[in-house]
Image: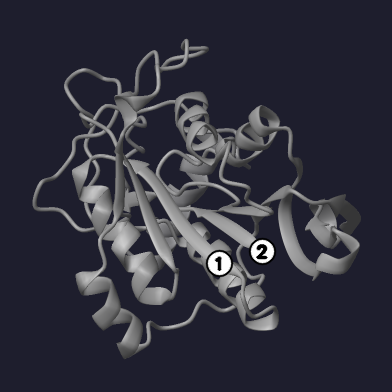
Amino acid sequence: MMKILVCIKQVLDSDRPVRIHSSGKWIETDPHGLYRMNRFDEFALEEALRIREAFPGTWVDALSVGPERAAQTVRRALELGADEGIHILLDDERYRMPWETASRIAAYAGNKGYDLILAGVMAEDDMQGQVGPMVAEIMGYSSATAVMSEKLIPDDNRIYVERELEGGHREAFALTLPALLSVQSGINRPRYPALSHVLRARSQKLITIAAKTWNPPAPRDHVVCLVEPAPVKSSVFLSGSPLEKAEKLVKILRENAWL
């Protein structure tokens, strides 16, 4: 039986206002805010479910590292069709650098015998795409990033992938299993949850493990500070007749050396 682990992250809904915390180290958390699964991770989960459909008997786990509220996102993965949900529970809301998150994922997955680990190409909140490759490095898995297509051949113990390059080009690889893939958006079309999965997810118990179960990894980097972007210059509205507006516009362009 093939085992697949999908790494998912809970992020603040992008439609909500984002404010920097007074510490300057991360954004303010909103207890009443809307949180959801990182959209890039939705493609990774969908790809795992499609592999399971192509190879019956495949088992799909979904794992998230986060505070108590992240359990909602793990349960969402169950609603979409994951077989098991794992929540590595953090005891506070502070921001974790990719190395900390990757170390905890690898600590859990290290002895579970996963043939394939899938992750989104990046996270929406910090735009980091490092957790997946770091997990692969810690666990000694072969890996590929920005994967746009994959073809799994279990009998050959390999997976064939194409990854996206700049300019619309693609690079093809044959990776020996076990492997980790960071999946690019657009590789598939994520499905809507089936009613049977939604009902199952309501009662299924999550595997919850306190992050302090493992000794925290020695930090390799840290956030120095976050700052708001500089405000853009205010707009200037030109008044007068069309000729007067044109003359004012030409003057502004010349003063700024744009003409």
Say left or right for 122 vs 62: right
Q: Residue furthest bottom?
A: 195
Question: For the point 35% across and 17% down, which residue is it?
Answer: 225
Where residue 191 sits: x, y (%)? 48, 82
Question: For the point 49% across and 14% down, which residue is it?
Answer: 221
- Say which of 85 and 230 sits in front: 85
Say left or right for 2 vs 173: left
Instruction: State whether residue 145 is above or below residue 24.
Output: below
Amino acid residing under circle 2: Met
- Say which of 231 and 75 sits in front: 75
Residue that badge 1 annotates? 59
Q: Quadrant of residue 101?
A: top left
**Local secondary structure at mark 1:** strand
Amino acid residing under circle 1: Trp
Instruction: Kindly tell me whether residue 257 is visible in this rendering.
Output: yes
Residue that badge 2 annotates? 2
Where residue 92 sits: x, y (%)? 20, 29
Instruction: State whether residue 27 is above or below residue 49.
Output: above
How far is mark 1 from mark 2, CA to CA? 6 Å
**Local secondary structure at mark 2:** loop
Q: How is the image coloured?
A: one colour
Where residue 251 sits: x, y (%)? 48, 42
Instruction: State whether residue 79 is above or below residue 146.
Output: below
* Labels 1 & 2 near each other (Cβ < 8 A): yes
Instruction: State whether residue 71 is above or below residue 151.
Output: above
Dot 1 or dot 2: first in sequence order is 2
